[in-house]
Image (spheres, helix red, strand yellow):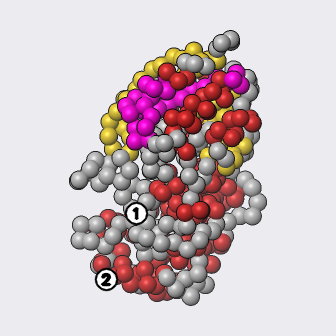
Amino acid sequence: MKYMGSKRWMLSNGLGRLLVQHAESSERFIDLFSGTAAVSWHVAQHTNVPVLAVDLQTYSSVLARSVIGRTQPLDGPQIAEEWIAEANEFRLRDDLWLEACEFDPQLLSAEDVFSARKLCSRSTDLVTGAYGGYYFSPKQAMSADALIKALPKLEPTRSACLATLIWSLTRCVAAPGHTAQPFQPTESALPFIRDSWSKDLFFVCRNVLPEIANQFAGVAGLAIVGDAVTVASSEAGSGDLVFLDPPYSAAQYSRFYHVLETVARGSCGPVSGNGRYPPADERPKSSFSLVTQANREMTELLSLLGRSGCRVIMTFPQHGCSNGIAGENLITIAREWFAVDVTSVRSKHSTLGGNNTGRASRQTGVELIMSMRPKRSR
């Protein structure tokens, strides 16, 4: 899954081993910025410690819950076949479905893209009406809406299927890196739209669902939508291991993942602009991405965790980031409350939509892993 600051690579490069080692001697693991839930999944699967996954955005809690919320594998292929078969029935009953099938992605022209947008604007369904003809082809968008309508009613299969849809949409989306802006039908971008619109969403879901279904927790955990500081103040205690992977960008993450948030919530207000953004009050805003507040928020969070007596592991780029924070500064702040051990690894970070032409899509840097033990007295 395309995501800013994803920890998947670092989990296999020392971070995963460190987290498991410390979690095994803890009563609970708290992931305060869970994002794609890669870290929460890893700890839940490799320990018998309950995981609490926290994020401002609903799609993150859906991804986390799909694995940490259960202690047994699911029959992914069987669930996929039943879910997709029902979705196909919804799709075939859509009044616009036959028209959607007339678009050939391989022969797509700019005029076809605009026609696709016009067709989708006639739909009252969630994904088709908001994003059809932009991020997704008419067939993909209608397939997504059909899959939403056919979601199982009961847990844990519902969360597994919804997480599958969210993840699968990121593999089909016609956008450069994230879902901040769809490709526009220019001569240079049309090949990317053709490639993205050629992907069969049902086929992708059939492959993704077993991957999620086969993963499960040693002990059932909990995924919630919440603010890191608020949750830390009410939840963190001396028996907890807290993982921090806070935002490093001054751009709000909700800008880049609003499509996923819409699908996770099952609703959104009127969309507008090139990015098809929902209203501002529907987009979560993190103080950790505000240059004027990020340092203060980090100081408050570390202070809260230090006073609670919990252990903390935090990752952050060593260099100064656009939200005004640098990993080296965080070490200084943390040492007010913790004894801090630091290791560093080479990593690559998203440049938020770079296309490798005018701007690289990824840049190499140094990521700090800070392991913090609370000071016994101050």
> From what the image shows, is residue 329 above or below residue 129?
above
Q: Position of residue 269 (x, y in %)?
A: 59, 71
Q: Residue at x 41, y 81 (%)?
A: 116
Q: Which residue is mark 2?
A: 111
Q: Position of residue 25 (x, y in %)?
A: 69, 20
Q: Amino acid at mark 2?
A: Glu
Q: Is residue 323 visible?
A: yes
Task: In the rendered view, tell whether residue 370 sits above or below residue 41.
Answer: above
Q: In this orientation, which residue lies closer to the viewer: 346 or 287?
A: 287
| In the image, residue 243 above or below residue 204 | above
**Which quarter of the figure is the C terminus placed in?**
top right
Label 1: few (<14), some (14–19) or many (≥20) C-alpha neighbours in 10 Å: many
- Give the residues drawn in magenta, as a range: 307-331
Q: Which mark is residue 235?
A: none
Q: Which residue is mark 1?
A: 181
Kind of residue at badge 1: Gln
Question: 191 or 201: nearer the eye?
Answer: 191
Determine whether, in the image, residue 222 is placed left or right of residue 370. Answer: right
- Does 327 appear in magenta? yes
Secondary element under disc 1, as helix, strand or loop, is loop
Q: Residue at x 52, y 60 (%)?
A: 258
Residue at x 53%, y 24% (from the top left corner):
333
Q: What residue occupies the far front of the structure in this picture?
A: 292
Question: In the rendered image of this protein, does residue 317 appear above or below residue 121?
Answer: above
